[in-house]
């Protein structure tokens, strides 16, 4: 069996005396798709933020390839797509992605090309030069997904990435997120049981506790929506 890529061991988290997560353990292997489910307030967003290395757990640890995800060098290999988008409203859709790519070491010309291709793959080609503050909520959500994909992470974490999409664009988003390339792992928080069924495993939280881990699909069920658009990132080792 393939060694885990991302591991969480007995993760717990408290904020101002309130327990948010208790004793969460999870192994995520390369290429694996895991659905994170549970009612609102169960701790899904907090867990994703901890897995991304943006906050340290109160107890336990999270490691990527054996190194703490709070290490900046490791954190750069993880992309977190926030439900609140995390975009810069005064920049265009393309510029939001280009800034992230240039910060990760891409040349300006490559960042422009990659941003355009990723936006096109999510049906946002006509909106590349639009200020994100003037886009609809669903469009902004897709820009956030595009940014996460463009960075070509080892692990993609997505918090309800289809919450504001209509049926057509929900399928577009899911097909791109569930088919990230190069053996990347995906952890996707969702309330939608149909999304969970398309993942390899389902981890369910209730009141911050891990109540179940179940097998999902036997393979990545891609449905009958639009074809997957492969994004040419032009990535080279630096």
Image (cartoon, helix red, strand yellow):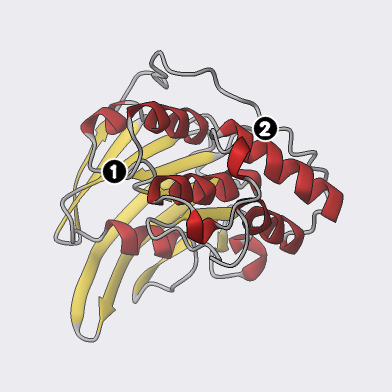
Which is nearer the eye, 44 or 12?
Answer: 44
Q: Is the residue 213 above or below the residue 13 in the image?
A: above
Q: Which x, y percent locates residue 182? A: 64, 33
Q: Which x, y percent locates residue 66? A: 57, 57
Q: Earlier in the sequence, mark 2 or mark 1?
A: 1
Q: Which x, y percent locates residue 83? A: 37, 56
Residue at x-position 83% and y-position 55%: 108
Verify CB contact (< 8 Å) between mark 2 and mark 1. Answer: no
Residue 33 relative to residue 14: left or right: right
Q: Secondary structure at mark 1?
A: loop
Return the residue at label 2.
Answer: 231
Q: Is the residue 176 above or below the residue 219 in the image?
A: below
Mark 1: few, some, or many residues within 10 Å (few <14, many ≥20)? many
Is residue 238 in sight in this rendering?
A: no
Q: Is the residue 150 above or below the residue 197 in the image?
A: below
Return the residue at label 1.
Answer: 190
Which is nearer the eye, 119 or 106?
Answer: 119
């Amino acid at each position: 069996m393939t060694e885990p890529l991302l591991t969480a061991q007995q993760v717990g988290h408290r904020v101002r005396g309130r327990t948010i997560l208790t004793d969460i353990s999870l192994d995520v292997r390369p290429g694996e798709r895991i659905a994170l489910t549970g009612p609102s307030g169960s701790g899904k967003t907090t867990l994703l933020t901890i897995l991304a290395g943006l906050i340290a757990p109160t107890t336990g640890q999270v490691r990527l390839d054996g190194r703490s995800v709070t290490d900046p060098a490791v954190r750069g290999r993880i992309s977190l797509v926030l439900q609140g988008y995390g975009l810069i409203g005064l920049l265009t859709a393309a510029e939001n992605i280009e800034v992230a790519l240039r910060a990760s070491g891409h040349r300006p010309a490559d960042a422009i090309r990659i941003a355009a291709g990723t936006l096109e793959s999510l049906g946002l080609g006509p909106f590349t030069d639009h200020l994100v503050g003037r886009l609809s909520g669903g469009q902004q959500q897709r820009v956030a997904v595009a940014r996460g994909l463009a960075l070509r992470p080892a692990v993609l974490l997505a918090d309800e990435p289809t919450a504001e999409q209509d049926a057509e664009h929900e399928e577009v988003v899911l097909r791109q997120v569930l088919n990230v390339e190069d053996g990347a792992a995906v952890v996707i928080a969702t309330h939608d049981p149909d999304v969970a069924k398309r993942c390899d495993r389902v981890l369910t939280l209730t009141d911050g506790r891990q109540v179940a881990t179940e097998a999902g699909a036997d393979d990545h069920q891609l449905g009958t929506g639009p074809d997957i658009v492969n994004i040419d990132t032009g990535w080279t080792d630096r």
